[in-house]
Image (cartoon, rainbow, N blue to C red):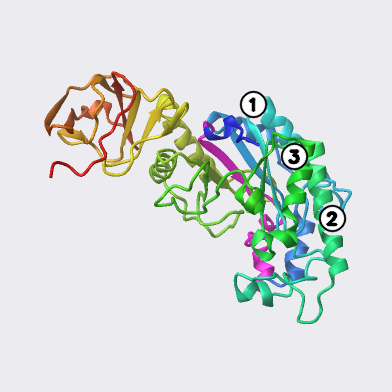
Amino acid sequence: MPMQPWFSDAKLGIFIHYGIYAVDGVPESWSFYSGKVPHEQYMRQLDGFTASKYDPKAWAELFARVGARYAVLTARHHDGVALWDTAHGDLNVVRHTPAGRDLLSGYAEALREHGLKVGLYYSHSDWNHPDYASTVHTDPPNEEVVGNRYASAAPGKEDPEAWARFLAYRNAQVGELVERFCPDLLWFDGEWERSEQQWKMRELSEEILAGNPDTVLNARMLSYGDYATPEQGVPLRAPDGPWELCLTVNDSWGYQHHDNNHKSVRQLVRYFTETIGTGGNLLLDVGPMEDGTIPAEQVERLEGLGRWIDRHRGAVYGTVAGLPAGHHYGPSTLSADRRTLYLICFDTPRESIALRGLRTPVKRVSVVGPGTGLGHRIIGGLGEVPGVLWIDAPTDADVDEYATVLAVELDGELDLYRGTGRD
């Protein structure tokens, strides 16, 4: 199936890691898997998960206001605790927590009311399911996958029938998500613990697309994913095809009381523009507290990023990846018709901004937001090698607090010189 066109122009999505791990503020699922927290203690968090202030309409309003076009909520993490009243498996917040209700229906409805695409995260693995640790990866990526009792069967203890039961359970839960919530995007995880053949990814993909052929699948469906999902760091070379960077606001995916190492708004603007400048989306993660409220520090940063996006909408939406490295010191985007370049300047420009290798004549240069025109001239060049376009620096009044954007309007489609110069 061709990639859904909404995805590549979304630019910003919100990732939401919400689950019982927010009660004690421990790493989601990993804390018992790694032995940091005893399993029994981790599971006691079920008793404290209230979702008492969970307001998906407020979430959706916030996400839409900051310029996001989609969101992805952890329907079930590696701990196996489902956020909806699944008929497959007993472990869910409806039956076993004070929250006592399905948390996905209101989320999906609220997002759609605000025009956002609905994403659901689902882990292939389930470290609490009795049939999960019943086999071993045929080509394990590391010793932990083989040796962890939550992940794999002990030597000589493999049980093919149990593994078949687990796959039936996983497929049934995914089928529920597709049928009941019709997600626009399914964001899978946990794929590293088995091979593609063991997961039966082809069959799962076919079942999902039979239920909703427009569903977008991330790369953790392996050969059957639609786009790449690098994590926590902007790639130095953009992946081939559609992609998104998933990134935390602080250092944690879920809510952790002690983690106050929040990225600044300026840093988030840099991550965002570097990502969209090479053709990706930023999937920015927040970790709600157990009651369902998003921490104020994270809301503040989302709103700061959102205000920057709103001031520079033309340089964000309806654009594609901009210039290759070397033409401009900073990220850039290009309008879909390839006739306007948007140059992003992180630091306050001094005297002039240089644009190298541009063959297309320039009609006008202006500061995005205030619209102030800027003088510009070409200096140098020889034969087929174009001169450098020097753009006058904007005045202090036109410089943005986080990143200033210049619109370079071209007299024709973008044409770049990529050669090595005259011999």
Of callouts 1 and 3, the N-terminal one: 1
Residues at discs 2 and 3 in contact (Cβ within 8 Å): no
- Res. 350 image quadrant: top left
Residue occupying the point 87% across, 61% down: 165
Answer few, some or many: residues within 10 Å of disc 3's Cα (few below 14, many 20 plus, some between 14 and 19): some
Q: Amino acid at mark 1?
A: His
Answer above or below: position of 387 versus 419.
above
- Is residue 293 shown in magenta? no
Q: CA distance from mark 2 to mark 1?
A: 33 Å
Residue occupying the point 73% across, 75% down: 149
- Res. 56 image quadrant: top right
179 to the left or right of 275? right
Residue occupying the point 60% across, 50% down: 219
Residue occupying the point 63% across, 59% down: 25
Q: Position of residue 184 (x, y in %)?
A: 68, 35
Answer above or below: position of 226 versus 322.
below
316 to the left or right of 412? right
- Is residue 27 shown in magenta? yes
User: Where is mark 2, residue-wise?
Assistant: 169
Q: How many marks?
A: 3
Residue 209: which disc? Answer: 3
Q: Is any part of residue 102 visible from this angle?
A: no
Quadrant where the N terminus lies? top right
Residue 179: which disc? Answer: none
Which region of the structure is painted magenta?
A: 9-36
Residue 114: which disc? Answer: 1
Answer few, some or many: residues within 10 Å of disc 2's Cα (few below 14, many 20 plus, some between 14 and 19): some
Q: Position of residue 415 (x, y in %)?
A: 30, 29
Q: Could you say whether the residue bearing mark 3 is in a helix, strand or loop? A: helix
Q: Amino acid at mark 2?
A: Tyr
